[in-house]
Amino acid sequence: MTVLEPPPVLGAAVDRVDGPAKAHGAAEYSIDVAYPHMAHAALVRSTIAAGRLRAVETDAALAVPGVLAVLTPFNAPRVERGPDTWAWHQPPPPLQDDRIVHHGQYIAMAVAETPDAALESARRVVASYEPADPILSLDDPRAPEVTDPFGSDVHRGDAAAAMAGADVVHDAQYTTPDETNNPLGLFATVAVWDGDRLTVHDSTQWPDSTREALAGAFGVPESGVRVLAPYVGGGFGAGLRVWPHVVLAALAARHVGRPVRLVLSRPQMFTGVGHRPATVQRVRLGARRDGTLVAIEHTSVQPVAVNDDNGPESVTTVSTVGYACPNVTAVDVQRRLNIPVPTSMRAPGDAQGHFGLECAMDELAYALGMDPVELRLRNYAERHPQLGLPWSSKALRDCYTHGADWFGWWDRDPRPGSTRRGDILVGYGMAGVSFFWFQAACSARATIDRTGQAYVCSAATDIGTGTYTVMTQLAADRLGLPLHRVRFGLGDTELPPAPMQGGSGMTASLGSAVHAACAALVADFIRRAVADPESPLHGVDPAEITVSAGRLHRTGDHARGEPYAAVLDRLGLTELSADASAAPATAERTGLAPAGPFAARFVEVHVDADLGTIRVARLTTVVDAGRILNPKTARSQIIGGTTGGIGMALLEETVTDPNTGRIANATFSDYLVAVNADVPDLDVEFVGGPDRFNPVGVKGVGEIGLVGVAPAIANAVFHATGRRVRDLPITLDKLL
């Protein structure tokens, strides 16, 4: 019998499996969840940045019709600080004392029958303060300093001595501003108690962490807390922590004895769910005349909150792994300010660090009279510079060479200001990217029922990255099923545990667990079939059996086999399931250095010679991201990240009043992001092959799309104008 195998689903440009539900409005986000008799909460924020609450007047707020309660630090029930994760501390519990540490801190919460009543009640709350003089600037000598905050500082070789002996030294300061994550979907939490059991619908990127934190905050078992996040309207890192509003929603629900929905406003999204911290970086590069790097010194100073810490997000680590250099000093410093706590924002640390390093490499290339691509190839790291081990995969050289050829890089006139089209100055710039590696332990479950349908699941989330789709494809491939017979479930803490959707590690982490669970399920089916005298596979060596088109069959002999359903029917089972877990590999066990994704960016900018306006005219990205499970969703991630990178380069800056600590542009009308008119057609290509550090062979694409865009644009602006801008964003006033 000749059987035509279906086309492979893994690696195919499949449309998003969750796309129809989102397009038809059937996807239920946390903001859409409703319960009978649900109440609504609204928050009141501090109008000072430092000091203490003297009193909170609530009589007028309580007089609003439909108000159920107004909670303040003076009457709120006790909640505890949730247990820390391996990645960071939990935020301090809200409404537990009278101390004010930043402008916009929550100082009260109104709970009412309707959203309008809750908002009106919150508006009528009147607070009086004992203000203190806030610390708001990195230059303020009162700011307490935290050295080596992430335990990641590197002192390799003798950078000072090598720098002193270098033929050419480049030394400059680069700054990046505060930026705000600003996912499109407002963060919302719906909480409902049933005795001591708590159910929470939340905009989280890590449901298991939310469950753990809420159990600790309210003193209930983790098994009594269920967190649901099947759809999240974007996050960019803002959904990784369990923020105070999540705890407050659960607190309100317990206090009034009803389900409660709490939705943050856009201004509250600027102060309540983190932001990318500003950096002041000094980069020193020492090189021989032939371009060989002999020393790198990279220091970064960034702010952190007075009473809270963000995650391990080194800015300078990029300089320890980006190039082959024997002498490297990389130092991060934090200074505590009266600001909302910073947190992860797409490509944390690497986005800022690559701006400093890759602009410095461009400046060094000009000082040497060398092409910027040639300089990077001259210092290409064939092995991991810090570990001394071969990479698990690396095709960055192909990114450089293929990208340069595709873009037409070699045809440019390297002289700054040399290319002009009428009143338009044309510039070309590029940057290399060596992104960090991340993978975490994860579990998954695979089930096949009597209809031959599969359900594969884990407590992970999909924040729009395509997790639903690529995991459906992976499961279909590993189970030998057509795509339409596989359903993937996620976003529920009653499913097998999963790590955060962050660090570009979900596909590798979850993919490894799905691979293991599907392999275990197939092995169980095979074991049962070969042991069953009634099976056509009875007695066949399990190693000679494969699965395809929903059938177990002898390899090369599709006729000798049977569908999954036949095995279940004979056994009298409605379904068969297998759970499995996967932990990341280690350098010690593999002898390999784990490699994150790599990329090269090539940009053409147009600058109006009279007005100084900047337009990105062309942008080419070549990425080594290991095995690409779905080129359509992968390319979409690069395009989205690149759009964010254009915003980082030219538009985005969270502006804080230096006297009061109030964020002055906390709306979408004032905080500028890249829109369609700012983004040209984007060229994206993938190179390289499967990575050796996980069984699926993947590396992340969720964040590398943003990294390197800002320095490539800055370098292109210099080539166009001869003006070197080292401070983001690059605005026209810096060119006039």
Image (cartoon, helix red, strand yellow):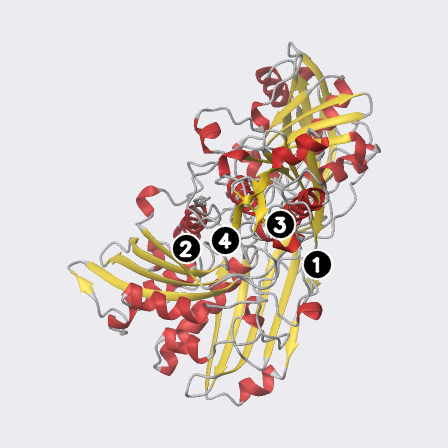
**Disc 4: which residue:** 701
For label 3, the SS is helix
Q: Is residue 533 left or right of residue 230?
A: right
What residue sits 45% from the left and 29% below the top? 20
Q: Is residue 679 left or right of residue 72?
A: left
Query: Marks 2 and 1: in contact by CB < 8 Å?
Result: no
Give the residue type at disc 2: Ala
Q: Quadrant of residue 94?
A: top right
Q: CA distance from mark 1 to mark 4?
A: 37 Å
**Residue 675 image position (x, y, % from top left):** 36, 42
Can you give x and y, in whole percent of width and height, for residue 598 in the image? 48, 63
Q: Nearer the viewer, mark 4 or mark 2?
A: 4
Q: Quadrant of residue 496?
A: top right
Q: Report the front residue among 470 and 177.
A: 470
Q: Which residue is mark 3?
A: 515
SS state under label 2: helix
First reached walking from the N terminus: tag 4 or tag 2: 2
> In the shown orientation, is residue 251 left or right of residue 17?
right
Q: CA distance from mark 4 to mark 2?
A: 20 Å
Rendered view: 350 above or below 453 = below
Find out whether the residues at labels 3 and 1 contact each other: C-beta distance under 8 Å: no
- Judged by depth in the image, the label closer to the viewer, 1 or 2, is 2
The crowd level at tag 3 (other Cα within 10 Å; few <14, some 14-19, many 20+) is: many
In this rendering, which labeled residue sits more in front, label 3 or label 1?
Answer: 3
Q: Which mark is residue 649?
A: 2
Disc 1 and disc 2: Cα gap in Å?
30 Å
Of labels 3 and 1, earlier in sequence is 1
Q: Quadrant of the C terminus?
A: bottom left
Which residue was labeled with disc 1? 144
Q: Is residue 422 above or below residue 466?
A: below
